[in-house]
Amino acid sequence: IGEYEFAQMLNEVLRGDRASELLDCAVVVARAINRHCVQGTYTGWPDGPLGIGNRQSDKKDTTFRGGALRRDLIDWFAPGKKYRTNMFVASSFRRAAAEKFECRAGASVDKDPVRWVFKFEHERCLHVNFLRPGAESTCTNELEFLLTPG
């Protein structure tokens, strides 16, 4: 819608967590997206460079996300620390896709580019959805996982 993606607007409402009709609608949409994505079995999993088709990735059982993070929060995100988020989080099977978002975010007075690395137990994660290129995802050349709000 305009210069904003639908996912960006949905996440903004979910992150804001302010009681309203808009939040009520966002929760219904989020639940519908999650329910649609988790039905059936995995059709894609990051099996590493030797994976075939929707299972080929840069590193086995690993996805990547790029962006920016406020400097005052960097120490909070320690390696190995578990956390929950109140928004959908997309991550790619390819480092290069994450790097594009790091570059787009760039550095500023209070933020630095950052790359998150997600490691999964092999095909045992129940809170991640593979987005099929051209089906659930409009990206036809990117393999990605969508982690659900939790």
Image (spheres, rainbow, N blue to C red):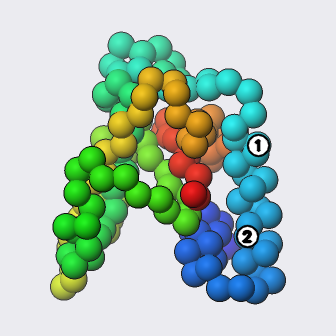
| Res 109 → quadrant | bottom left
Label 2: which secondary element: helix
Decide if residue 140 is in sight here.
Answer: no
- In the rendered image, the vertical position of residue 84 relative to residue 50, given as above or below: below
- In the rendered image, the vertical position of residue 40 relative to residue 24, given as above or below: above
Which residue corresponds to the image point at 69% horizontal and 37% vertical from the top-left? 38
| Nearer-N-terminus badge (1/2) | 2
Label 1: which secondary element: helix
User: Which residue type carries mark 2?
Assistant: Ala
| Disc ID at residue 26 | 2
Where residue 96 appears, as percent x and y from the top left, is 31, 43
User: Which residue type carries mark 1?
Assistant: His
Where is the N terminus found, in terms of image quarters? bottom right
Where residue 112 appears, as percent x and y from the top left, is 21, 70
Q: Nearer the viewer, residue 110 or 35?
A: 35
- Crowding at dot 1, Cα within 10 Å, few <14 / some 14-19 / many 20+, comes out as few
Between marks 1 and 2, how big is the CA–CA gap? 15 Å
Which residue corresponds to the image point at 71% horizontal and 85% vertical from the top-left? 19
The answer to whether 3 appears left or right of 67 in the picture is: right
- In the rendered image, the vertical position of residue 98 relative to residue 17, given as above or below: above
Where residue 59 appears, as percent x and y from the top left, is 31, 28
Which residue corresponds to the image point at 29% horizontal and 70% vertical from the top-left? 69
Where is the C terminus found, in terms of image quarters? bottom right
- In the rendered image, the vertical position of residue 114 relative to residue 141, given as above or below: below
| Disc ID at residue 36 | 1
State if disc 2 and disc 1 touch (CB < 8 Å).
no
| Res 64 → quadrant | top left
Decide if residue 70 is in sight here.
Answer: yes
Where residue 70 appears, as percent x and y from the top left, is 27, 76
